[in-house]
Image (cartoon, rainbow, N blue to C red):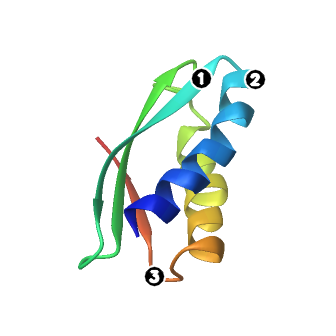
Amino acid sequence: MQEQVTKVIEKIRPYLQRDGGDIELVEVLPEKHVVRVRLQGACHGCPGATMTLKLGVERTLREEVDSQITVETV
């Protein structure tokens, strides 16, 4: 699961970087279906960060890796 999540994060990263932000994969907990990430740059503290995580990152991970994944920020 770690490899699949990493590939999806790498796929999403250019879209965040285009807006001056970035994302770091911190941890994958497959037994809990949890992916922990850290938003950086313009994404850190952005009012739209929650939407980016839920509608962008989490949705893509659910579609491409596991439909039960939850994304958490650290």
Label 1–label 2 contact, CB within 8 A? no
- At label 1, counting other C-alpha atoms closer than 10 Å, the crowd grade (few under 14, some 14-19, many 20 or more) is some
Q: Is residue 74 left or right of residue 67?
A: left
Look at 24% across and 79% down and name the residue there: 31
- Which residue is label 2 attached to? 18
- Give me the residue at 44% from left, 73% from top: 69
Residue with the mark numbered 1: 21
**Vertically, is 12 above or below 15?**
below
Task: Classify 10 Å Cα crowding around label 3: few (below 14), some (14-19), many (20 and above).
Answer: few
Give the number of callouts: 3
Q: Residue at x 67, y 24 (%)?
A: 17
In front: 46, or 65?
65
- Disc 1, disc 3: CB below 8 Å? no
Badge 3 element: loop
Q: Quadrant of the C terminus?
A: top left
- Residue designated by label 3: 68
Label 1 element class: strand
